[in-house]
Amino acid sequence: MAKSKFRYNPKTLEYEKISLRVKDYFLKGLLYTVPLVILSGVFGWLISSNIDSPGELEAKNENRFMKAQLHEIKKELGNLNSFRQDLQDKDDNLYRTIFESEPYPDHKRNLSIGGINRYDGLEGYDISTELIETKELLSKLTRGLVAQSKSFEEVFNLVKNQEDFLAHIPAIQPVSNKDLTRMASGYGKRIHPIYRVIKMHWGMDFTATTGTEIYATGDGVVKAADNKYSGYGNRVEIDHGYGYVSLYAHMSKMKVRYGQKVKRGQVIGLVGSTGASTAPHCHYEVMKDGQKVNPAHYYFNDLTPEEYNKLLEKASQKGKSLD
């Protein structure tokens, strides 16, 4: 039974019993209830803000997964774009150079899409930045590949119209890969093995055993087969027409004569070490319009891309030449 409440009356100098009304009980209840409700709400908010529900956990895990996948896709697109750029470089600087054609126009390669922002619907999300960057990279890659496809169509038409031209270009190695001991020296400045000074090495040295066959690298007419220049030893020069001339030096034996017509792949001599040479090899040069050029640019007819890249790597190594 609840205890009775009393209040002192100073007028009567007596304690009087207090009678509580319904309103008093209600206010008293509120005094205890309101703080509890407020505390419960605060605790509920803290819990809901810091502890994820199963559904929220699943959504966050899915979001992290999607971000990781988007990052990988963006990375792969970057690799594909690098491959496209490599195709473009070879197209402009190799294939079109061979046909003496101008590079594919920049304004056709770099077509841009103007107008309104095409990605405004992707903004406002956690992954918006990376998603928009990925879409832009994909769009750039697509436009670049379309342009490259059209450029290759032009190159293909050049090929069809210039079969004779292609047959005469020096387009293979003068010594077969199977016969090579190694590729000793490439085009560029090298230490001369005899004079011990840095000199320009105008060709490439293919080392092989004495007597290994040397091949004409393109159709043409022999314009020299002699030993007039002691440095070259026994040498053969072939005029391929279209401004191209190839030279093969240090032969142990020449198998063609002046004025003779030759075909690509025909044996024109044997590897030796005549002239200013320190070991058996074939020194090979290519001239275009009277200017000596890097022969490495003209092996596209019998080398795979992997073999060609290895050849370029070896040819770029510094060191001594053999002549």
Image (cartoon, helix red, strand yellow):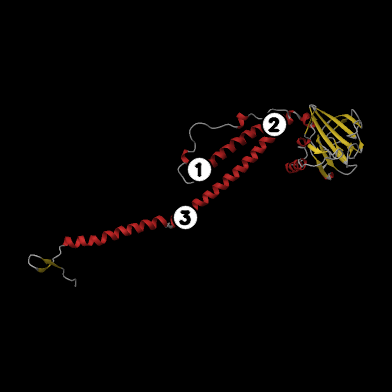
The front one of 118 and 89 is 89
Residue highlighted by disc 2: 155
Left or right? Give the position of 228 relative to 65.
right
Q: Position of residue 209 (x, y in %)?
A: 88, 44
Q: Check disc 2 and report its element: helix, strand or loop.
A: helix
Instruction: Pick whichever of labels 3 and 2 is earlier in the sequence.
Output: 3
Q: Position of residue 249 (x, y in %)?
A: 87, 35
In three-dimensional space, the C-alpha distance between marks 3 and 2, rounded to whole angstroms, equals 53 Å
Q: Quadrant of the N terminus?
A: bottom left
Q: Would residue 221 appear left or right of 311 to someone viewing this image?
A: right
Q: Which residue is mark 1?
A: 129
Badge nearest the viewer, 1 or 3: 1
Disc 3: which residue = 58
Circle 1: residue type: Thr
Q: CA distance from mark 2 to mark 1?
A: 39 Å
Q: Residues within 10 Å of mark 2 (few under 14, many from 20)?
A: some
Can residue 187 be seen in this snapshot?
no
Mark 3: few/some/many CA within 10 Å (<14, 14-19, 20+): few
Look at 55% across and 49% down and name the residue there. 69
Say which element carries label 3. Answer: helix
Relative depth, front residue between 113 and 42? 42
For marks 1 and 3 on the same chain, the one whose residue lies earlier in the sequence: 3
* Horizontal and vertical percent position of residue 245: 82, 30
x and y percentages locating residue 44 in the rendered image = 36, 58
Q: Tell me what residue is drawn at x 61 percent, y 35 percent.
A: 144
